[in-house]
Image (cartoon, coloured by chain):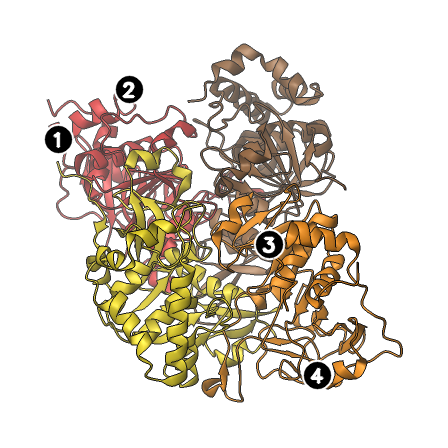
Chain colours: A brown, B yellow, C orange, D red
Amino acid sequence: MSERREHLLDEQQAAAWVEHGMTIALGEPAPMAMVRQIIRRKVRDLTVISSGLALDHLIAAGCVRKTISYYAGGGVGVPVAPSFRRAAERGEIVVWECEEGILTSGLEAAGKGLPFLPWRGGVGTSLPEVNPDLKVFTDPIAGETLIAVPAIKPDIAFVHAAVSDAYGNVQHHGGPGWIDLFLVRAAARTVVQVEQVVSNEAIRGNPWATTIAAADAVVRVPWGAHPFFSRGHYIQDVPFINDYVASAAAAAKHGGDPQLKNYLQHYCHEPVTHADYLERVGLTRLLGLREY
Amino acid sequence: MSERREHLLDEQQAAAWVEHGMTIALGEPAPMAMVRQIIRRKVRDLTVISSGLALDHLIAAGCVRKTISYYAGGGVGVPVAPSFRRAAERGEIVVWECEEGILTSGLEAAGKGLPFLPWRGGVGTSLPEVNPDLKVFTDPIAGETLIAVPAIKPDIAFVHAAVSDAYGNVQHHGGPGWIDLFLVRAAARTVVQVEQVVSNEAIRGNPWATTIAAADAVVRVPWGAHPFFSRGHYIQDVPFINDYVASAAAAAKHGGDPQLKNYLQHYCHEPVTHADYLERVGLTRLLGLREY
Amino acid sequence: MTGEYTVREQMAAVLARDLQDGELLQVGVAMPVAELAVRLAHLMHGPNMELIFFGGRMNVHHLEYYPIPEYGWDNRVVRWTESYSDRGHRFDQLKDWGRRVFFIGGIQVDQFGNTNLIGIGEDFNKLRFRGPGSVGTPTLSSHVGRYHIVLNDHNSRVLVEQCDFVSTVGWGRGGADARSRLGLPGGGPKWCVTPLCVMDFCEQSKRMRLRSLHRGITVDEVQDNTGFELLIPDAVPSTDPPSVAELDVLRTRVDPDGLLRGT
Amino acid sequence: MTGEYTVREQMAAVLARDLQDGELLQVGVAMPVAELAVRLAHLMHGPNMELIFFGGRMNVHHLEYYPIPEYGWDNRVVRWTESYSDRGHRFDQLKDWGRRVFFIGGIQVDQFGNTNLIGIGEDFNKLRFRGPGSVGTPTLSSHVGRYHIVLNDHNSRVLVEQCDFVSTVGWGRGGADARSRLGLPGGGPKWCVTPLCVMDFCEQSKRMRLRSLHRGITVDEVQDNTGFELLIPDAVPSTDPPSVAELDVLRTRVDPDGLLRGT
């Protein structure tokens, strides 16, 4: 009799699912091991549902045609992610302007198989003007003015989590990022990168803790969210993040500043595997990012 | 300096929140200690969002004017809850016909502060005909035919759970009933009856397990779901349930059958407290309902 | 040896064979034949099937023995759960329900596979028989890849020309596009399995059609107990009986207490 | 003794005094003054306040010392969480957000308290300055009981006659019914607190109005640094300075590292 199929892939196999022109979504903390592999594949024309500096990485690497983002902040003291800001101001990317409630409504609509969901947040703002996909309409029950948000359908959602069993039953420690489950429910396929693969019995010991059932692919990448945090595993690497932001800001200001190109080369293009990346970061540095 | 306020009430204090004509919602397993106290208060004209035999208890006791129920089954071998069936066939109650997805859409709309949410399940059925509150409409994005479900707004949701701290931070064991969190999010106030009150520190040890934050009232009633189950605490009391169903079926068939009246008198009206009820059930019987 | 099986074992075996590995299986309340059919398929050929029950999602292919709970609402059945399918939001991933198969009963089933759990009577406000309500069947039947109607009794009170009220749309008033015109993404009812026979739906008209007869049942017997004119092909085969292997798994691992062996 | 306080401590104290026990407090990103104001109120007079941060909901009234994280996205701040406010569905209980108070900044704020996080320029497709995006501010500002606009700088580049783009509706184009006409249930912006002063909104016109001046600031200074005509009452009081007790709690329990004591 045949056996139950495992859902384990390595990071390169999972990244190979991403093709030019796809819509991909990134959870929070960003699944950086997968982001680096996607950059390494030199995929183009992606529509990216993401926020902050992970989005900035993909824009800096030239992978992005369109962003669906509620927030592209740049970290401490940098109000706007530098590569996002430069690309948007130069018209190199299309910005599908939205906000958290509009984004989650569109994702919920996709998950529920509905063409749209109504939302109130954004009524009276410029959002429906700058994003013509958002339609102001009159509700059929009470006659109120609401925004109809069309279903947002990612091809692949990439999220980071603490553990999974081999069958894709994922459990977060300390809760998933706030948007992660919306992304998973809306996406055609889900790839979860995890700190650790655990036994099926460990999952069944507390099934209510399972946050994602039967993810399409599980990728085992310890420290996979670096330089961001992973709850219960490590805190974010602030100097590393600041270095990236400084590089990206310099590149945005001066055009062809080599610092950002070097960063992408050294940390995204050259390391073949996630382990190669970790070797470049160094174990001493990684172990310094304590877990509490 | 003043202290943080506790949310603990006893079962009579919590039942006193229920007034004639209110809309109340019952979770699953049904919060039977509270149901019995509500019956004991002889409240009238309630609109009740509930299913199965808990709903049947309230109808049998004459508390109900209108039901919002996706399913009023009567248990093993009894397709329809007897008191519900009799009252509906005789026109003694108004049935707001719905189904799970329509009910949860109406509850979600209430929780989100929206006048309605769209739903597809029910398109093409008799539901919009027999329930004129459900409006078939054309969606403003893709032109599809959907049902607009109006917001459903319970005054109070009553649910059963395993534990809570004194501040109403509730954790279920083995997950809440599937509809419970919908009810909680939609209701103006929430009363949670629990098997056990635990320390705030115990809750903070695993905050992701908190299923309801800051419930308005917590009522400590061990075996409070009897004769139904409480995951991790006890299984349902099948003979007790069957006795109730037999009484209710006889009363529905013959009108004034005394068996059901006796049941309500003995188990709902006479016991002043939940402990009084448990004394009548008997500790030997309760301990026989093992927890695994 | 294969001669010794009950009609309920026959029904379970027929249903089990239609289920594909990798599918998610969800059974309505009080449907033991379908419950056990699902478990039979899971053990026979479905190591990647997932059973949905009571909000839990489980794969028990590795278990030696997986009893059905003695009581329909016995929460102990979730002991093997790996996740909850509805962590407070049961219908959040409906778009993926094409891989889900559902099993449904009804107080009325009509010639187009529409079913009724609402009630019987002309006037909704004066029902002669008040049904239990639709549970989640309108949403489920609209979205699952396909579903089977499973009846404990085959008679003309249940199998009627037209339902008094429709709680799940099968093939509406007929025609291959009956569901797509309504915008329903799910594949609709595939079979109606009863103690007498298996029925399916004509590809064009979507009227119910006799597909196979269980052992010892005649065409006339089926038609006499059906409240509408059934499509009858020229040759109606016998339903394939349960195999030795199926009966062995059924009796030793799925139904050791003989729930399906009683009458 | 009370003479020794910084303007940021003043701003935190003003904001803290407006917060009522039992309210839920949520602060936008990169707003240390508001973050610390919330903690100050919680410890001073809010044993039943709940702080919402990073999806977590916490009550830390009982803690001796509760440091602000050194980094805005430092997940360690959730260590005191009692629940997650958004177990996968952040906006499921918006109807209860009348008890919630929010704090918001902006790259532009106009005379009616509308704010802009989208960008600066005439044409959305050719922005001179691309902003970070609206985060959740449109939804938050539509539903919370009230909110405060808190600015790190008071100048006419930020405080403008009309925002180039509106990401949160304050009082629209003015008038007491500006929000109810849009159907927004939340109470709208109450104050705009800056390093120079506290401003509120005229009850009728909903234009921004000077409410109090921080120590050493003149009316002219405020108007000169504001890009629109501010309503100026005949008598403008001084902002109540932080009390000894407030400064004590602030410096020993809320802000021991002196985040607000720097310039």
Parent chain of label 1: D
Parent chain of label 4: C
Q: Which mark is residue D243?
A: 1
Mark 3 and mark 1: span between their CA atoms?
Answer: 53 Å
Q: Residue at x 69, y 36 (%)?
A: A6
Q: Residues within 10 Å of mark 1 (few under 14, many from 20)?
A: some
Q: Are marks 4 and 3 in contact (CB under 8 Å)?
A: no
**Number of the front mark, 1 or 2:** 2
Indicate the quadrant containing the C terminus of chain B: top left, top right, bottom left or bottom right. Answer: top left
**Number of the front mark, 4 or 3:** 4
Identify the amino acid type marked 3: Ala
Q: Residue at x 27, y 69 (%)?
A: B39
Identify the amino acid type marked 1: Ser
Mark 2 and mark 4: span between their CA atoms?
Answer: 85 Å
Compared to residue D164, the image places residue B45 above or below, namely: below
C238 or B99, nearer to the observer? C238
Q: Which mark is residue B82?
A: none
Are tags 3 and 1 found on a single chain?
A: no
Identify the amino acid type marked 4: Asn
Position in image of residue B102 (x %, y %)? 50, 66
Q: Residues within 10 Å of mark 3 (few under 14, many from 20)?
A: many
